[in-house]
Image (tube, rainbow, N blue to C red):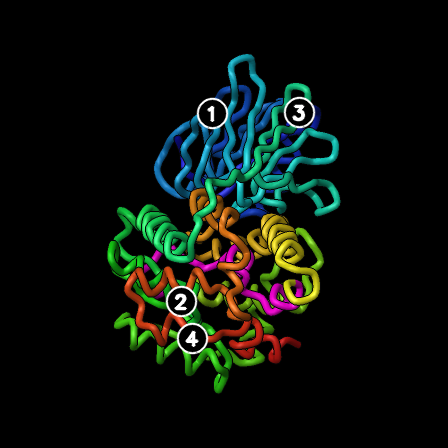
Amino acid sequence: MMHCSAFAVFLGEGAKDRLRKSLPRVDRHRRRVLASDGADFRDPVVLREAELVIAVLLLDGEGGLPAVHGPLFDGRENPSGEFSFLDVEEGGSVLAGRDLLGTRPLYVSRDGKSIASDHRFLSSPQEGRLLPPGSSYRTSGASVRTRFLGRVHPPDSMSSAASGLAGLLESSVRRRVEGERRVAVSFSGGLDSSIVAHCAARHSDVILCSTFSGGSRDEKQSESIAEKLGLPMVSRAVTGDDIRRELKALDLPFEPTPMDRALWCIYSTTARLARENGAETILLGQLADELFGGYVKYVRATEEGGVLAAETMMEEDLARCGQVGLVRDELACSRYAEPRFPFADESVASFALSISPDFKIWGGTRKHVLRESAKLLGLPEEVAESPKKAAQYSSGILKLLP
């Protein structure tokens, strides 16, 4: 199995030319392994005319298919982990797939002749469609099969929900840092990144990385919470000029909103900090808000339409993360470090979906069950109960956008 930074398949007439045109857009710096009609090539110039071209951009080492973009791939009949993957089945049909939460993208061109883990392999965003999370695609018959995240037996009390969740979070973080010499955590001082950092520090050398504008809430809170956690932190206070430079590299398969642009700048800068400080992997706390009722709008939905309305809104937002948010954040980080998302673990997400919304929003308190889990994991109460705004606001980055 080959872990890679990106892969693509080009089928039919003109496959070779489509590959040649797309490679410079995707990655100018990775070593390349190219396969055409079963033969391996190191230089696209030597590719002969072919109607099947497979391009894999290597992270390190050598290997053959399947190629996996992302960590923790378990390629059984129902694969799990964070991934998009590519393989060739007996008979020559190409098989590609995407994980259940959508942490890594997978695109298929409208004509079915191109498959890619990076939208830049395609000539334009309009040429391809992003497959839903949990999808697998076979070129034979152009068939799409989609698996959906399951649920488990719901916990019957707040204490059982909190203790079960604590164990799953600890396990999820451990699996994502095992074997890593040093890992970074994208750190804002909020509940989600504090849980990830605290758990990761039990299994690896951890460096907290924070990006904000000078004088923002995140500047003060991240330093204070890092001290309470007893973990080293590096930070960067960015200016308007820094933001303008960062936005020059913005390349998304959709029209970015101001929020998308702000978050791109935050995670791109933070991942660069991670690499500069010796970490090739960065952990992020994405999906905690959608899974555990972290946004004010969920409280309003509960007040206006009851818990079912809030639950429906959370599930819709979770699905949208696999179409927009995780695609954006993975691209922002992966230029410098491999992002990993502990809350996107299938066992964590399935358990979260099974928890009663009443446990998530408790007396108007958002993410209550997650806060109780944080205390069981050993976080100080003032950290577990610390309030936090969305990153684009608390960091002050949104105000710096041109």
Q: Which residue in the structure is indicated by mark 3?
A: 143
- Whether residue 99 is visible here, answered yes or no, is no
Residue 341, position as x, y percentages in the image: 44, 52
Q: Residues within 10 Å of mark 3 (few under 14, many from 20)?
A: few
Instruction: Identify the mark at residue 386; answer none if there is no mark.
Output: 4
- In this view, 269 is above or below 116: below
Q: Residues within 10 Å of mark 4 (few under 14, many from 20)?
A: some
Q: Residue at x 57, y 37 (%)?
A: 148
Please state which of residues 24 and 112 is positioned toward the viewer in this rendering: 112
Residue 265, position as x, y percentages in the image: 55, 67
Instruction: Identify the mark at residue 273; answer none if there is no mark.
Output: 2
Q: Which residues are the magenta region?
A: 274-301
Q: How far is disc 1 from disc 2 in space, using C-alphas?
A: 38 Å
Residue 294 painted magenta: yes
Query: Which residue type does callout 4 highlight?
Result: Ser
Secondary structure under tag 2 reads: helix
Q: Earlier in the sequence, mark 1 or mark 2?
A: 1
Name, please, the residue furthest toward the front: 156
On screen, residue 116 versus residue 195, left or right, reads: right
